[in-house]
Image: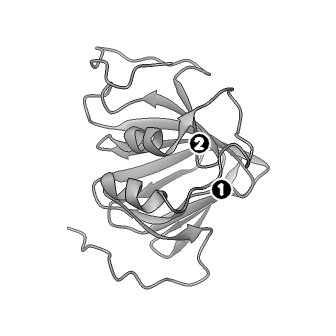
Amino acid sequence: MTEPDRPAPIALHRAEGEGEALWFLDFLATVKGSSAEMNGAASVIEHLGRRGSGSPLHVHHNDDEWWYVLDGEMTFWVAGQVIQAETGSFVYGPRHAPHTFLVTSDEARFLHVTEPGGFDGFTRSLGRPARALEIPSEEIAPLDLERLPAIAAEYGIEVLGPPGIPTAIPHFGHQKETS
């Protein structure tokens, strides 16, 4: 485990299985590099989830994000574009672009990076320390849709809809203009 607010080191290294482990939504999320450790430049979090795990439809107003699929298959929906991502795939989602994703293989492991950093704080606020380095059961980590929008808003994230890939392009009345 790491301490979230410790000063940024000159070099940062986390081996497999190392990092702050959290149960976040229905993922095992391991913070590989926190915003504090990376001088605010980025947050790097490894996620492990089962088929059907994903994020609510949302938009980031303060940060860009990208994903790199380490193992498995995922489907991403970014601003109306559906992307099938297999092992080795990279997907980028710029700030202000509505997006969501879904694990479509039995399991998937991926890196999630936000620039600038700060998403690790959101992950801590909504998640809880993992008792084991495994995907949490649904009973352990239910999606709290009641708390999610308020906590997300504190980090510049606007929740637009439930988890799942939209079948049509939703109307986004609150979407900010991109610059």
Percent of width and height locating residue 50: 73, 48
Position of 27 with respect to 122 (left or right) is right
**Residue placed under numbered mark 1 in the picture:** 74
Task: Say above or below: 126 vs 18.
Answer: below
**Callout 2 amino acid:** Phe
89 left or right of 87?
Answer: left
Q: CA distance from mark 2 to mark 1?
A: 9 Å
Residue 91 circle label: none
Q: Residue at x 33, y 24 (%)?
A: 37
Badge 2 crowding class, 10 Å Cα cut-off, few under 14, some 14 to 19, many 20 or more, is many
Of pointers 2 and 1, the one earlier in the residue sequence:
1
Callout 2–callout 1 Cβ contact below 8 Å: yes
Q: The C terminus lies in which quarter of the figure?
A: bottom left
Q: Residue furthest left?
A: 179
Q: Residue at x 40, y 51 (%)?
A: 65
User: Badge 1: how crowded within 10 Å, few (<14), some, or many (20+)?
Assistant: many
Position of residue 162 measured from the top left corner of the image (x, y, whole percent): 57, 69
Q: Amino acid at mark 1?
A: Met
List the residue tagged with mark 2. Answer: 110
Q: Residue 4: image x %, image y %?
A: 37, 25
**Residue closest to the far right:** 106
Numbered circles on residues, count: 2
In screen coordinates, is 100 left or right of 150?
Answer: right
Q: Secondary structure at mark 1?
A: strand
Given residues 87 and 62, the one toward you in this image is 62
Q: Position of residue 15 (x, y in %)?
A: 56, 17
